Amino acid sequence: MLKKEYTKDNFEAFKSGITNMRIKEAEKKVIKSSASADEFKILTYQLFEEVGNNSSNDQKNKMVDIVEAWSISLNDSEWYEELKEFCEKKENIVSAFAVSNNKEKEEFIILVDDVTDDSVLEYNEFAFELRTKYSNIYDFMIIDTNMEESINSMFHNKEKIYMRG
């Protein structure tokens, strides 16, 4: 059996992996939670206090960026609810995102298991109707899960609206 030497880089990679795993688990807890909006407000405020007391200016600015994005979304997200309700009714839809590169041109992406499924035609029809109904929607895409990573490089702002399960 070979003895492996542990380096600072190995340890940093390990810490990063554990942190990412903990984040994914925390996301699952939030998604499955039945907490009220007021309870989430209180928890969010506690998070602000913790970040404010124990974080770098860079981390504090990132937190403020998130809050500013939330406030924009809370005020202009009427179509988000329609998209979420639609997605909840479809078994082939994995998730949906609101995306943009600037605040004026909003787009959405529906991520599906299989784009060759005939149901995607229905999704396109719904998407065109939603875009017609809300003038702030610039465009949309319906893509399969293999393309999910490309979303991160294509759009500066990405907000999850719906996630199956």
Image (tube, rainbow, N blue to C red):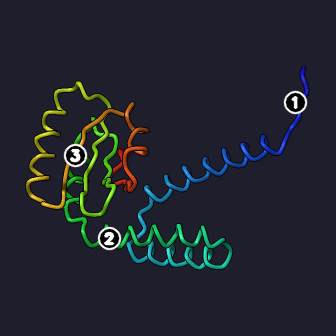
User: Tag 2's secondary structure?
Assistant: helix
Left or right: 125, with 60 as reference point: left
Question: Few, some or many C-alpha atoms within 10 Å of disc 2 (few <14, some 14-19, many ≥20)?
Answer: few
User: Tag 3's secondary structure?
Assistant: strand
Question: Few, some or many C-alpha atoms within 10 Å of disc 1 (few <14, some 14-19, many ≥20)?
Answer: few
Q: Quadrant of the N terminus?
A: top right
Residue linked to disc 2: 72
Residue linked to disc 3: 140
As drawn, 7 above or below 68: above
Kind of residue sitting beneath label 1: Lys
- Mark pair 1, 2: CA separation: 50 Å
For the residue pair 113 and 14, the one nearer the viewer reads as 14
Residue at 22% in and 46% down: 140
Residue at 13% in and 37% down: 122
- Which sits earlier in the primary sequence, circle 1 or circle 2? 1
Kind of residue sitting beneath label 2: Ile
